[in-house]
Image (cartoon, rainbow, N blue to C red):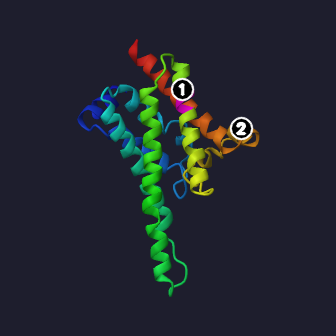
Amino acid sequence: MYRLLSLHERFPYFLPTVSAFALLITLPPFNLWPLILVALVPIYIFIFQEKNIRRVFSGGLFFGLVFSGSLFFMVFSSFTWIPEAYLFSNSVKLLAIPIVLFTGFAITLAIYLFKVLMPRTPFQRAMLFGIFFAVVELVMDNVLTGFNYGSLAYAASHIPALRFLASVGGMFLVTFAVTFGNAALSEALRFLFQT
């Protein structure tokens, strides 16, 4: 934990980058889905440790753009339709730019609001973190008309208990559970390393 924080001091956006790439490799083609249980711990620690609200905003933006940019690059770079329709294929690939910007700003807004509204108790912080990420996924799902490949629930679908939650409350309840779990783990680590 101390090494992570010292790296954070030398490279201010190290923790958001680690979180973004950890989330990215939980999805296909990498399929390292067990990382979904800890992938958001670095960004949570970054949000909590960073005192400068502008750096929290820019760190959130960096996290959002790195995650969504890498994700959509993987999805859209291999898009081909028919060889004669190069204009259509390139137009679809360029569509990734506004999607990445929208996704990045939605994640940034959630992280910024979480920092500004951060409650006092660890349980309330974990709840709010989970709620904000679930709301971001709900908004992105509605705006992007159901494109949910980057959803945390997608990677968590390999875990039987979370599949049960999906049958009860859908992908947004799974997203809430994953982010709540990551935040609770972060709070436990903070408690262990403070004493």
Q: Main secondary structure of the magenta part?
A: helix
Is residue 55 one of those drawn in magenta?
A: no
Residue drawn at x 51%, y 72% is 79
Q: Which residue is mark 2?
A: 165
Rendered view: 34 above or below 113 = below
Give the residue furthest to the bottom.
Answer: 84
Q: Which residue is mark 1?
A: 126
Question: Which of these two is toward me, 75 or 61?
Answer: 61
Q: Which quarter of the rendered picture does the N terminus lie within? A: top left
Give the residue furthest to the top.
Answer: 195
Q: Position of residue 17 (x, y in %)?
A: 37, 44
Secondary element at image label 2: helix
Name the side, left or right, on which 51 lies relative to 147: left
Q: Please provide the residue range marked out in magenta.
A: 126-130
Give the residue type that dot 1 points to: Ala
Secondary element at image label 1: helix
**Picture quadrant of residue 166:** top right
Q: Position of residue 116 (x, y in %)?
A: 42, 27
Give the residue type that dot 2 points to: Leu
Q: Mark on residue 191? A: none
**Distance CA(mark 2)–CA(mark 1):** 18 Å
Residue drawn at x 63%, y 56% is 146
Residue drawn at x 51%, y 55% is 30
Q: Position of residue 28 (x, y in %)?
A: 55, 56
Residue drawn at x 42%, y 54% is 101
Rendered view: 121 above or below 150 = above
